[in-house]
Image: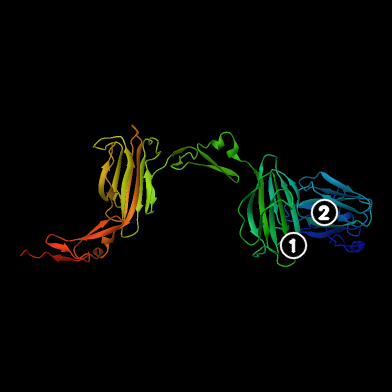
Amino acid sequence: MLGESRDVCKECWPSLADSRGEEGRFCARSSFLGPLHYSQRGRQAAAVGWRGVGGCVTLLLFPCPLDHPELHVHGSVSQPSVLVRLRGGPGRLLEEGAPPSRLWVEFRSSSNWVGKGFFAIYEAICGGDVKKDNGHIQSPNYPDDYRPSKVCIWRIQVSEGFHVGLTFQSFEIERHDSCAYDYLEVRDGHSESSTLIGRYCGYEKPDDIKSTSSRLWLKFVSDGSINKAGFAVNFFKEVDECSRPNRGGCEQRCLNTLGSYKCSCDPGYELAPDKRRCEAACGGFLTKLNGSITSPGWPKEYPPNKNCIWQLVAPTQYRISLQFDFFETEGNDVCKYDFVEVRSGLTADSKLHGKFCGSEKPEVITSQYNNMRVEFKSDNTVSKKGFKAHFFSDKDECSKDNGGCQQDCVNTFGSYECQCRSGFVLHDNKHDCKEVSAAC
């Protein structure tokens, strides 16, 4: 487009209407700019720009001589300060200081002037150095389809000491398994040799991106065939709140996220309602065959006003056994204040095995079926060390077909055995029973 000869000056359109798009031409000549077309101040203006070419600059080429009148180029209609005045011969203007996607071109002459006028060619130039703490970048011609055979490179730099964050608003680039045709490439640095973060294409928005320094490098490439809507992405300076002395106000752990952060807690603790402090965690739904449970805050004293419920579930035909390794809670035989309650089943009205408190370890407890409920409760006064217990699951062979036993089946850990009632003895096959013969 920009290499056209001056023969284009022979062509002109009798209009100065808005010119929009990635490239084009506009002109004015004396046969058109007669007195009827002038305002009282004696000037004629044309708005020239294009939609949504984020991060682009405006390139104006004036291949024809400009007669005596002046041509003014402004940043925009709303910002009328003159960026450049052209007078006389042809000129080339590469304007980077104005708003990126719009220029205001104004042609001035006196009411009695007659001349050839001017002819200009414009084109959207994508990419460039972007030194801002936040902004917006789009593929050329967005949200319309990008043009073929484009190569755009943006070098983003935010304030020193910060990182660059990228959040994609939309993304639609020709799809290919290895992104060989059209793609957006992002590198962690300021050059093509910087560490590659990713090469993206297709219709899925990439995940948020964060640089390791204050610089980020983007390259958009389109081939000569299929064109899509392209992409729109916001960039901003990313603050690592967790590196501050107070770690973002987090009591235990601070996790930095793009554009924000969140607090987390050590194992055995959970976030309090204020999302900053941590408090002892407890309870849960457990489906492992074996494991352990402890009072909140273990091995430290449990906090007041806790109500923890563990629901243990094993596969069908299994039973669960609970064995306490340590036990110490407030209370006595009544268990009115702090206590541990164990039930077969998952609800508060399931079969009760026992309600325990004090410092005496309970005996091993085995569930009636394949589930167990353990509840710990503390009041708002005395706190003790609490408890530690482990649980294990064992298949109950007797639960199916009585284990093959003719009379009684007794489940044992890891196995089972058949037994016979009074007046019978176990057969050699260990399953059947035979009647005891009378003594001679």
Residue 330 image-quadrant placement: top left
Which is more toward the observer, 220 or 270? 270
Q: Residue at x 49, y 40 (%)?
A: 275
Q: Which residue is mark 1?
A: 147
Which is more toward the observer, 130 or 290? 290
**Measured from the top left, where is residue 429 in percent x and y?**
22, 66
**Measured from the top left, where is residue 113 in percent x and y?**
94, 52
Q: Residue at x 24, y 37 (%)?
A: 334
Give the distance between the C-alpha atoms of the residues marked 2 and 1, in whole angstroms.
Answer: 17 Å
Disc 2 crowd rating (10 Å Cα; few below 14, some 14-19, many 20+) is some
Q: Amino acid at mark 1?
A: Arg
Disc 1 crowd rating (10 Å Cα; few below 14, some 14-19, many 20+) is many
Which is more toward the observer, 374 or 15? 374
Q: Quadrant of the C terminus?
A: bottom left
Residue 424 image-quadrant placement: bottom left
**Measured from the top left, where is residue 18 in percent x and y?**
78, 57
Asked if residue 346 can be seen in this view, the reply is no
Q: Amino acid at mark 2?
A: Leu
Extreme residue toward the top, this view? 381
**Measured from the top left, where is residue 37 in percent x and y?**
86, 55
Q: Tell me the number on the disc at residue 133.
A: none
Q: Is residue 100 above or below residue 432?
A: above
Q: Which residue is mark 2?
A: 59
Asked if residue 421 can be seen in this view, the reply is yes
Q: Quadrant of the N terminus?
A: bottom right
Extreme residue toward the front, this view? 440
Label 1, secondary structure: give it: loop
Specify which label sits upstream in the sequence, 2 or 1: 2
Label 2, secondary structure: give it: strand
Which is more toward the observer, 359 or 224? 359
Q: Residue at x 64, y 58 (%)?
A: 171
